[in-house]
Amino acid sequence: MFAAVLLAAAKAHALELKPYKDRLFGYPGILQPDGSDSYSIVDYRESRDIDQRDQVPERRVWSRYVSLKVRKVQVELEVDTPSGMLKHYVVGQPEGARLTVIYIHGKGGNRKQGVNDYSFGGNFNRIKNLMVRNRGIYVSPDVPHFDQNGAKAISALIAHYRKTTRRAPVILACGSLGAEICYQIAQNPGAAAMISGYVLLGAPPVAGIVSSAAYQRKTPFLFAHGSRDTVYPIDNIESHFRRFKSKSANYPARFIRFETGTHGTPIRMIDWRNELNWILSRQ
Protein backbone atom coordinates (compact mmCIF):
# COMPACT_ATOMS: atom_id res chain seq x y z
CA MET A 1 0.00 0.00 0.00
CA PHE A 2 2.78 2.42 0.96
CA ALA A 3 4.70 1.60 -2.24
CA ALA A 4 1.58 2.29 -4.31
CA VAL A 5 1.19 5.69 -2.66
CA LEU A 6 4.82 6.54 -3.40
CA LEU A 7 4.41 5.49 -7.05
CA ALA A 8 1.29 7.59 -7.45
CA ALA A 9 3.04 10.58 -5.90
CA ALA A 10 6.05 10.16 -8.21
CA LYS A 11 3.80 10.05 -11.29
CA ALA A 12 1.92 13.11 -10.10
CA HIS A 13 5.17 15.10 -9.93
CA ALA A 14 6.68 13.75 -13.17
CA LEU A 15 7.50 16.35 -15.78
CA GLU A 16 4.96 16.35 -18.61
CA LEU A 17 5.55 18.42 -21.73
CA LYS A 18 2.74 20.80 -22.60
CA PRO A 19 1.16 20.68 -26.07
CA TYR A 20 2.64 22.44 -29.06
CA LYS A 21 1.12 22.01 -32.53
CA ASP A 22 -0.19 18.58 -31.52
CA ARG A 23 -2.84 18.62 -34.25
CA LEU A 24 -0.17 18.97 -36.92
CA PHE A 25 2.44 16.62 -35.46
CA GLY A 26 0.36 13.94 -33.74
CA TYR A 27 0.25 10.51 -35.35
CA PRO A 28 -2.27 10.49 -38.22
CA GLY A 29 -3.69 7.16 -37.11
CA ILE A 30 -2.87 3.93 -35.27
CA LEU A 31 -3.46 0.88 -37.45
CA GLN A 32 -2.80 -1.81 -34.90
CA PRO A 33 -2.70 -0.95 -31.22
CA ASP A 34 -1.88 -4.00 -29.10
CA GLY A 35 -3.85 -2.93 -26.04
CA SER A 36 -0.73 -1.62 -24.31
CA ASP A 37 1.77 1.16 -24.97
CA SER A 38 4.61 -1.14 -26.00
CA TYR A 39 3.97 -1.65 -29.74
CA SER A 40 2.04 0.47 -32.23
CA ILE A 41 1.74 0.56 -36.01
CA VAL A 42 1.31 4.12 -37.27
CA ASP A 43 -0.47 4.94 -40.53
CA TYR A 44 2.08 6.63 -42.79
CA ARG A 45 1.42 7.76 -46.34
CA GLU A 46 4.00 9.56 -48.46
CA SER A 47 1.29 11.34 -50.48
CA ARG A 48 -0.07 12.92 -47.32
CA ASP A 49 2.90 13.10 -44.96
CA ILE A 50 5.44 14.43 -47.48
CA ASP A 51 3.64 15.71 -50.59
CA GLN A 52 0.92 17.60 -48.71
CA ARG A 53 3.02 18.57 -45.72
CA ASP A 54 6.00 20.00 -47.60
CA GLN A 55 6.09 23.05 -49.82
CA VAL A 56 9.20 21.54 -51.42
CA PRO A 57 9.10 17.76 -50.85
CA GLU A 58 11.72 16.60 -48.31
CA ARG A 59 13.34 20.04 -48.26
CA ARG A 60 10.95 22.69 -46.97
CA VAL A 61 7.81 22.19 -44.91
CA TRP A 62 4.89 24.65 -45.13
CA SER A 63 5.31 27.61 -42.77
CA ARG A 64 2.36 26.69 -40.52
CA TYR A 65 4.48 23.84 -39.14
CA VAL A 66 7.24 26.08 -37.81
CA SER A 67 7.80 28.98 -35.44
CA LEU A 68 11.12 30.77 -35.91
CA LYS A 69 10.90 32.75 -32.66
CA VAL A 70 12.90 29.93 -31.09
CA ARG A 71 15.98 31.03 -33.04
CA LYS A 72 16.38 33.89 -30.56
CA VAL A 73 17.53 31.36 -27.95
CA GLN A 74 19.62 29.19 -30.29
CA VAL A 75 23.40 29.54 -30.03
CA GLU A 76 26.41 27.70 -31.43
CA LEU A 77 29.01 26.75 -28.81
CA GLU A 78 32.03 24.53 -28.20
CA VAL A 79 32.92 22.28 -25.28
CA ASP A 80 36.24 20.58 -24.55
CA THR A 81 36.13 16.77 -24.82
CA PRO A 82 38.64 13.89 -25.04
CA SER A 83 38.31 14.15 -28.84
CA GLY A 84 38.96 17.88 -28.89
CA MET A 85 36.61 20.85 -29.02
CA LEU A 86 33.10 19.73 -29.90
CA LYS A 87 30.90 22.17 -31.80
CA HIS A 88 27.19 22.04 -31.05
CA TYR A 89 23.99 24.05 -30.98
CA VAL A 90 22.03 24.72 -27.81
CA VAL A 91 18.41 25.86 -27.91
CA GLY A 92 17.01 27.23 -24.66
CA GLN A 93 18.45 28.39 -21.36
CA PRO A 94 20.65 25.71 -19.68
CA GLU A 95 20.71 27.28 -16.22
CA GLY A 96 17.86 25.67 -14.29
CA ALA A 97 16.55 23.70 -17.29
CA ARG A 98 14.15 20.90 -16.33
CA LEU A 99 15.03 18.55 -19.20
CA THR A 100 17.79 18.05 -21.78
CA VAL A 101 17.21 16.37 -25.14
CA ILE A 102 20.30 15.65 -27.24
CA TYR A 103 20.02 14.63 -30.90
CA ILE A 104 22.82 12.50 -32.38
CA HIS A 105 22.95 12.60 -36.17
CA GLY A 106 23.87 9.67 -38.41
CA LYS A 107 26.55 9.14 -41.05
CA GLY A 108 26.95 12.14 -43.34
CA GLY A 109 25.14 14.47 -40.95
CA ASN A 110 26.39 17.23 -38.68
CA ARG A 111 25.23 19.55 -35.91
CA LYS A 112 23.24 21.64 -38.39
CA GLN A 113 20.89 18.80 -39.27
CA GLY A 114 19.29 18.74 -35.84
CA VAL A 115 18.43 22.45 -35.86
CA ASN A 116 17.15 22.66 -39.45
CA ASP A 117 13.71 24.21 -39.02
CA TYR A 118 12.28 23.22 -42.40
CA SER A 119 13.60 19.74 -43.21
CA PHE A 120 12.03 16.48 -42.00
CA GLY A 121 8.57 18.04 -42.04
CA GLY A 122 9.48 20.68 -39.46
CA ASN A 123 9.93 18.08 -36.73
CA PHE A 124 13.24 19.52 -35.50
CA ASN A 125 11.57 22.91 -35.16
CA ARG A 126 8.89 21.28 -33.05
CA ILE A 127 11.34 19.67 -30.61
CA LYS A 128 13.16 22.99 -30.28
CA ASN A 129 9.91 24.77 -29.44
CA LEU A 130 8.79 22.02 -27.08
CA MET A 131 12.00 22.33 -25.09
CA VAL A 132 11.94 26.12 -24.84
CA ARG A 133 8.23 26.24 -23.97
CA ASN A 134 8.72 23.62 -21.23
CA ARG A 135 11.89 25.15 -19.72
CA GLY A 136 14.16 22.51 -21.21
CA ILE A 137 17.13 22.64 -23.57
CA TYR A 138 17.79 20.93 -26.89
CA VAL A 139 21.35 20.15 -27.97
CA SER A 140 22.54 19.16 -31.45
CA PRO A 141 26.28 18.31 -31.60
CA ASP A 142 28.69 17.16 -34.25
CA VAL A 143 29.67 13.51 -33.86
CA PRO A 144 33.43 13.17 -34.49
CA HIS A 145 33.42 9.36 -34.67
CA PHE A 146 30.81 6.60 -34.45
CA ASP A 147 32.87 4.57 -32.00
CA GLN A 148 34.17 4.70 -28.43
CA ASN A 149 35.97 7.98 -29.10
CA GLY A 150 32.76 9.54 -30.34
CA ALA A 151 30.89 8.19 -27.33
CA LYS A 152 33.50 9.69 -24.98
CA ALA A 153 33.08 13.08 -26.66
CA ILE A 154 29.28 12.96 -26.36
CA SER A 155 29.57 11.74 -22.76
CA ALA A 156 31.71 14.79 -21.96
CA LEU A 157 29.06 17.00 -23.56
CA ILE A 158 26.35 15.36 -21.48
CA ALA A 159 28.36 15.75 -18.28
CA HIS A 160 28.92 19.44 -19.09
CA TYR A 161 25.21 20.18 -19.39
CA ARG A 162 24.28 17.96 -16.46
CA LYS A 163 26.24 20.34 -14.25
CA THR A 164 24.65 23.40 -15.79
CA THR A 165 21.11 22.02 -15.56
CA ARG A 166 21.54 20.70 -12.03
CA ARG A 167 21.24 17.07 -13.10
CA ALA A 168 17.93 17.41 -14.93
CA PRO A 169 16.87 14.29 -16.90
CA VAL A 170 18.77 13.71 -20.15
CA ILE A 171 17.14 11.96 -23.10
CA LEU A 172 19.42 10.84 -25.91
CA ALA A 173 17.84 10.63 -29.38
CA CYS A 174 20.00 8.88 -31.99
CA GLY A 175 19.28 8.74 -35.71
CA SER A 176 20.48 5.92 -37.98
CA LEU A 177 24.19 5.14 -37.40
CA GLY A 178 24.17 7.68 -34.56
CA ALA A 179 22.64 4.86 -32.53
CA GLU A 180 26.15 3.47 -32.17
CA ILE A 181 26.76 6.38 -29.78
CA CYS A 182 23.60 5.54 -27.87
CA TYR A 183 24.70 1.91 -27.56
CA GLN A 184 28.25 2.77 -26.50
CA ILE A 185 26.93 5.07 -23.79
CA ALA A 186 24.36 2.48 -22.69
CA GLN A 187 27.12 -0.07 -22.15
CA ASN A 188 29.32 2.24 -20.05
CA PRO A 189 28.11 2.25 -16.42
CA GLY A 190 29.30 5.80 -15.71
CA ALA A 191 27.86 7.28 -18.90
CA ALA A 192 24.64 5.24 -18.70
CA ALA A 193 23.96 6.62 -15.23
CA MET A 194 23.51 10.09 -16.77
CA ILE A 195 20.80 9.03 -19.22
CA SER A 196 17.08 8.90 -18.44
CA GLY A 197 15.93 7.49 -21.79
CA TYR A 198 16.96 6.55 -25.33
CA VAL A 199 15.10 7.28 -28.58
CA LEU A 200 16.37 5.24 -31.54
CA LEU A 201 15.25 6.53 -34.94
CA GLY A 202 15.85 4.20 -37.88
CA ALA A 203 18.68 2.64 -35.90
CA PRO A 204 20.61 -0.61 -36.39
CA PRO A 205 20.34 -3.42 -33.83
CA VAL A 206 23.27 -4.30 -31.60
CA ALA A 207 24.13 -7.59 -29.94
CA GLY A 208 24.46 -7.65 -26.18
CA ILE A 209 22.38 -4.59 -25.35
CA VAL A 210 20.32 -6.68 -22.90
CA SER A 211 23.45 -7.09 -20.78
CA SER A 212 24.29 -3.38 -20.85
CA ALA A 213 24.41 -1.05 -17.87
CA ALA A 214 21.40 0.85 -19.23
CA TYR A 215 19.36 -2.35 -19.44
CA GLN A 216 20.28 -3.28 -15.89
CA ARG A 217 19.10 0.17 -14.78
CA LYS A 218 15.81 -0.35 -16.68
CA THR A 219 16.35 2.86 -18.61
CA PRO A 220 13.49 3.35 -21.10
CA PHE A 221 14.21 2.57 -24.76
CA LEU A 222 11.99 3.74 -27.59
CA PHE A 223 12.45 2.31 -31.10
CA ALA A 224 10.90 4.03 -34.14
CA HIS A 225 11.33 2.43 -37.56
CA GLY A 226 9.91 2.45 -41.07
CA SER A 227 8.51 -0.85 -42.37
CA ARG A 228 10.26 -0.32 -45.74
CA ASP A 229 13.65 0.72 -44.38
CA THR A 230 16.22 -0.79 -46.76
CA VAL A 231 19.25 0.38 -44.73
CA TYR A 232 18.31 -1.51 -41.57
CA PRO A 233 15.46 -3.94 -42.38
CA ILE A 234 12.66 -3.77 -39.86
CA ASP A 235 12.54 -7.53 -39.20
CA ASN A 236 15.96 -7.30 -37.53
CA ILE A 237 14.89 -4.33 -35.43
CA GLU A 238 11.66 -5.94 -34.29
CA SER A 239 13.59 -9.07 -33.30
CA HIS A 240 15.94 -6.80 -31.37
CA PHE A 241 12.93 -5.26 -29.60
CA ARG A 242 11.47 -8.66 -28.75
CA ARG A 243 14.74 -9.59 -27.04
CA PHE A 244 14.22 -6.59 -24.76
CA LYS A 245 10.75 -7.75 -23.81
CA SER A 246 11.57 -11.46 -23.55
CA LYS A 247 14.23 -10.87 -20.91
CA SER A 248 11.84 -8.76 -18.85
CA ALA A 249 8.17 -8.47 -19.81
CA ASN A 250 7.81 -5.28 -17.80
CA TYR A 251 10.89 -3.60 -19.23
CA PRO A 252 10.06 0.01 -20.28
CA ALA A 253 10.59 -0.46 -24.02
CA ARG A 254 8.31 0.79 -26.78
CA PHE A 255 8.23 0.19 -30.55
CA ILE A 256 6.66 2.53 -33.13
CA ARG A 257 6.35 1.01 -36.62
CA PHE A 258 5.63 3.47 -39.43
CA GLU A 259 3.84 1.38 -42.01
CA THR A 260 5.32 1.91 -45.54
CA GLY A 261 7.87 4.33 -44.05
CA THR A 262 11.50 4.37 -45.20
CA HIS A 263 14.80 5.09 -43.46
CA GLY A 264 14.20 8.77 -42.69
CA THR A 265 10.52 8.43 -41.79
CA PRO A 266 10.95 8.12 -37.99
CA ILE A 267 12.80 11.46 -37.79
CA ARG A 268 10.05 13.14 -39.80
CA MET A 269 7.10 11.46 -38.10
CA ILE A 270 7.94 10.80 -34.46
CA ASP A 271 5.56 12.62 -32.14
CA TRP A 272 8.19 14.16 -29.87
CA ARG A 273 5.78 15.27 -27.19
CA ASN A 274 4.02 11.92 -26.94
CA GLU A 275 7.19 9.85 -26.82
CA LEU A 276 9.17 12.11 -24.49
CA ASN A 277 6.22 12.14 -22.10
CA TRP A 278 6.16 8.34 -22.24
CA ILE A 279 9.82 8.24 -21.21
CA LEU A 280 9.36 10.85 -18.50
CA SER A 281 6.42 8.94 -17.03
CA ARG A 282 8.74 5.94 -16.52
CA GLN A 283 11.24 7.85 -14.38
Image (cartoon, rainbow, N blue to C red):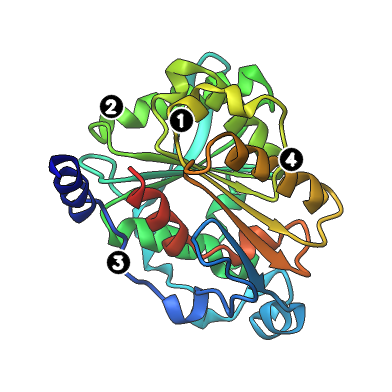
Instruction: Between label 2 and label 1, give the one nearer the viewer.
Output: 2
Q: Residue at x 66, y 44 (%)?
A: 242
Distance CA(mark 4)–CA(mark 3) = 31 Å
Q: Is residue 17 positioned above or below 42 on the image?
A: above
Choose between 69 and 200: the one closer to the eye: 200
Which quarter of the figure has residue 131?
bottom left
Name the quadrant of the C terminus: top left
Q: Which mark is residue 18?
A: 3
Amino acid at dot 1? Glu
Amino acid at dot 3? Lys
Q: Position of residue 25 (x, y in %)?
A: 51, 74
Q: Are marks 4 and 1 in contact (CB under 8 Å)?
A: no
Distance CA(mark 2)–CA(mark 1) = 16 Å
Query: Of label 4 and label 3, which has the lower sequence position?
Result: 3
Q: Position of residue 107 (x, y in %)?
A: 74, 40
Distance CA(mark 3)–CA(mark 1) = 30 Å
Q: Are marks 3 and 1 in contact (CB under 8 Å)?
A: no
Amino acid at dot 2? Lys
Q: Are marks 4 and 3 in contact (CB under 8 Å)?
A: no
Please name the residue that numbered disc 4 is placed on.
Answer: 204
Which quarter of the figure has residue 127?
bottom left
Q: Position of residue 74 (x, y in %)?
A: 40, 52
Q: Visible in this render: residue 234? A: yes
Query: Of label 3 and label 2, which has the lower sequence position?
Result: 3
Distance CA(mark 3)–CA(mark 2) = 25 Å
Name the quadrant of the N terminus: top left
Please name the residue that numbered disc 1 is placed on.
Answer: 78
